[in-house]
Amino acid sequence: MRLVRLMSASLSGYLVGTLPSSDVASRLATGGSVDLRSAGSRNPGGMNVLRVLGRRAGRAVIVADIGKGYVACGLGRRLAGDVGAHVAGVAAVLGHCYPLWRRFRGGKGVATSFGQCLYTFPAYAPIDVAVALAASRAPGLRRPALVSVGVSSTAWLLASVLWWTRGLPNLWGPRPTAALPLANAATVLVIASKAVPALLRRDPADLVAPR
């Protein structure tokens, strides 16, 4: 039964992650005439929506994507306890990045992973934002977005190990166990699977710092 509950948490998280927030924004703003997979950076995520459709739509999509990660973790926790929350969070990021219904052409998972962090590692969430912003605004960077993702992801993973080994308080999140760094490591790998190809193809979106 434990395995069944964890599988249910994983499936639920994946399904929530596949919810097409950017496609909904495109339909509302343009009647569906703009395909975000071929416009701008060709990434169906909040930052590309912000650049192509404007700030209002972009911010709405970013909030929605964060919400997907948070809601997925909540469902996972109800289905399979604290470990279920971690499993569902990773699955939500996977679903956002590789949605089955869109031939696995999804976003980069950064906002959804923050939703995961906000639920499973809320004690670190404000630090995560500060680290990402500081990294993106460091002078002399040619690819601030990628640097921001790389630095903040690494710091997030290292912090989760610290919280687990030291037993530090985690606000409303699950008690830190080995599941926290393991889940965070899995999420970082999913994000890296999207970031590395963008780096190799010199994605123009990576030349712009997040706002």
Image (cartoon, rainbow, N blue to C red):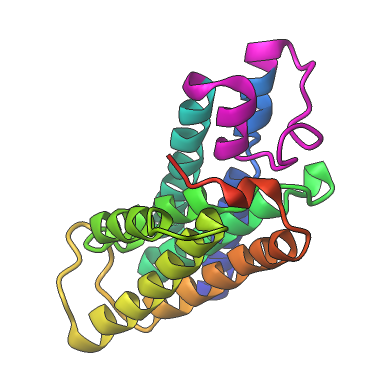
The extreme bottom residue here reads 165
Please tell me which residue lies in front, 70 or 7: 70
Residue 51 is a magenta residue: yes
Position of 198 compared to 132: left or right?
right
Where's residue 3, x and y in %? 56, 74
Q: Is residue 181 left or right of residue 166?
A: right
Q: Is residue 190 above or below residue 13?
A: below
Q: Quadrant of residue 126?
A: bottom left
Magenta extent: 27-56
Placement of 156 over or under 58, stated as above or below: below
Is residue 187 something one can see in this rendering?
A: yes
Q: Position of residue 169 (x, y in %)?
A: 15, 70
Which residue is painted at 20% across and 66% down in the image?
170
Is residue 99 depicted above or below 120 in this figure? above
Q: Given the current orientation, which residue lies at the most extreme right position? A: 103
Q: Residue at x 64, y 46 (%)?
A: 205
Point out the residue furthest to the front here. 140
State whether residue 119 is above or below residue 49.
Answer: below
In what quadrant of the picture does the C terminus appear? top left
- The image position of residue 187, as x and y in percent, is 54, 67
**Front in this rendered view, residue 143 or 127:** 143
- Residue 142 included in the magenta stretch of the image: no
Whether residue 80 is visible, yes or no, is no
Q: Position of residue 118 (x, y in %)?
A: 33, 53
Q: Is 123 displayed left or right of 161 in the figure?
A: left
Foreground residue among 144 and 163: 144
**Residue at 58% in and 60% down:** 91
Write the residue at 38% across / 59% down.
138
Please state the total of marks drawn on the protein image.
Answer: 0
